[in-house]
Amino acid sequence: MQRDPLGFFQRARNHYGELFTLPFGTALARTVWVCDPVLVEQIIAAPAEELEAASANAILRPLVGDGSTLLLAGEEHADRRRLLAPEFDHARLAADRAEITEKAASELRSWRTGEVIALWSWARRVTMEIMLETVFGIGSGSRRERLAAGLSDIVERSGSLAMLIPRLRLDLGRLSPWGRFLRRRAAVDELLYAEIAARRAEPLLELRQDILSLAIRAVYPNGRTLTDTEIRDEIMTLIIAGNQTTAGGLAWALELLLRHPLELARVREDLQSGSEAYLEAAIEEALRLRTPLFGIGREAVVDYPLGRFTIPRGTGIAVPLLLVYRSPALYRDPARYKPRRYLEAGAQRPAWVPFGAGIRSCIGEGFARLQIGVLLREILQTAELELVDPNPGRMRLKAGALVVPEREVLVRVGARAGAQQAPAASALSPAIPGSR
């Protein structure tokens, strides 16, 4: 499954049907995987008293901690979402747009004709820098560099089977994979708690608008504020769940456009006219075919009827999104990269592709779409790129959930003659859902 997630689940579905059981996929001992999009929509819309995400998401506990929104349930989860929602409102996104645009322009000015860029490494770095500026309000300097290096290292070290199968989490010393992960996590925690302490002592805390400062100032209706541990866990959630998926969405969107020159030309032509409709469609299609987050999970809180089966209480339920998003029940020519499908008259798509829906929809959807849209727009208007290797690699999983290519994607910077600056765009104006 790690080496070939799409092929693995295609074979499993073809052999066992639309529902089958595996001993992994959530933090629960037994997990039913569901491939039927009609049943998936039922799962996503189910109320928390029937299906709950917190126990299933506990597989991420070593990364995000107990205080993460991902691991909260019931009213506690709903209250935390309401508390954090202002951090992702439209006013904040409008301010973030200018910062992201400037960051993109600065990055592109450093590119030189003939230079070869490792696309995924670049996407992770630039989105991490944007995230740290937005989350911590830290500009350039050694503090940001240490945080960026530590957080990136944590994600890389979490890509073992132990993240997918909890019983393999054995600390056999500093040279063992899990032991190295735990020690690097402790080092990153030290940096995070130092930032939290420094920010609490900041004389101008009330004037700061970064997410860390907003989280420190946030107050529940009963007057309670977040503890340092809760803030640390929410920050880790934003970095791990937000940065890695955003970087993946950006890299996949650009790679797919480079592999489809006609679609790339259509996006650029639309941008020149002052529209971003085709750019948005290209991003939407990339997020469908190469969804950065492989799956979602729930726990059956009750004996849960699902199709012709009843899922026993306490059983995990998981959805292989990478497979479900290719269902012919949802899309015509589902395996084809076809951005214009979203612009055709009467075009419809499930509201839960790819950011979920309901009480577990992604709270950072707006910020993720903003980053991907602005960065991709600036690249396409400014640079000419070509793939060094025209042969696409297979998809694989990292950290048990992130969809990445089996090898780094290299792109070469070319000279783009006669490029014109497109009119200032209204830029993607996404809705703001919640936290998966």
Image (tube, rainbow, N blue to C red):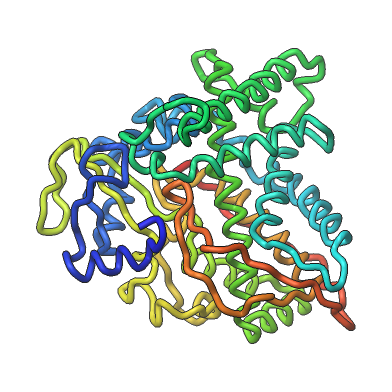
240 or 327: which is nearer to us?
A: 240
- Above or below, 103 relative to 353: above
x, y (%) of residue 33? 25, 54
Residue at x 58% of width, y 65% of height: 252
Question: Residue 284 vs residue 113: left or right?
Answer: left
* Looking at the image, residue 369 lies above or below residue 329: above
Q: Residue at x 75, y 13 (%)?
A: 201
Q: Quadrant of residue 189?
A: top right
Residue 309 left/right relative to 176: left
Name the one closer to the observer, 396 or 270.
396
Seen in the picture, residue 427 relative to 362 is either above or below; the reply is below
Question: In this orientation, which residue lies closer to the viewer: 176 or 22?
Answer: 176
Looking at the rendered structure, the number of numbered marks drawn on it comes to 0
Q: Spot the residue most to the bottom.
A: 262
Q: Position of residue 340 (x, y in %)?
A: 55, 80
Identify the residue shown where x is 55% and y is 26%: 183
Locate the C terminus and report the quarter of the image it occupies: top left
Across and down, in percent, residue 301 comes to 21, 36
Picture residue at 49% right of the left edge, 65% below the top: 290
Side (left or right) of 199 relative to 404? right
The quarter of the displayed image where residue 130 is located: top right
Quadrant, the N terminus: bottom left
**Quadrant position of residue 223:** top right
User: Residue 68: percent from the left, percent from the top?
Assistant: 48, 30
Query: Compared to 176, does 358 lie above or below?
Result: below
Residue 239 as seen in the image, left or right of residue 359? right
